[in-house]
Image: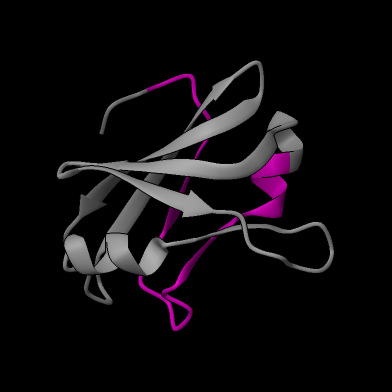
Amino acid sequence: MEVTGNPCFTTNLKQRTYELLIPANVVREHALTFGDNIKYIDAEGVMKGVRGKWAEDRVCFKGWDSICRRNRLKERDTVNCEMLHIRKKVHSVKITVTRG
């Protein structure tokens, strides 16, 4: 796996496939902020994600189901999400899939 200076987290296929939840501890540890939209970047190209509404200041983005389908994610697959940012404001999530 490539080593980067950008904040990263891993996830897998969950029941709520329509949204990507950014772990609160990652947001806090790196003091990240988010706009209303992000770009999902995978091996196939770029797709847009729209920020969802959550209680407790959680951060999530819709459109994740399209990424799951396009990458044919299975339950045992692991997804590495690298958050690309400019001065702590995340603009894109680079996705790398490891088959399980």
| Figure quadrant of residue 68 | bottom left
- Is residue 100 at least partly visible in the picture? no
Position in image of residue 52 (x %, y %): 63, 62
Position in image of residue 77 (x %, y %): 25, 65
15 lies left or right of 75: right
Position in image of residue 59 (x %, y %): 67, 55
The residue furthest bottom is 15
Q: Which of 34 and 27 is in front in this view?
A: 34
| Figure quadrant of residue 39 | top left
Q: Nearer the viewer, residue 25 or 95?
A: 95
Q: Nearer the viewer, residue 58 or 44?
A: 44
Position in image of residue 11 (x %, y %): 43, 60
Residue range of the region highlighted in magenta in the rendering: 4-27
Residue 26: in magenta span:
yes
- Vertical arrangement, residue 17 with respect to residue 95, above or below: below
The quadrant the N terminus occupies is top left
* Residue at (48% x, 19% y) in the render: 5
43 lies left or right of 87: left
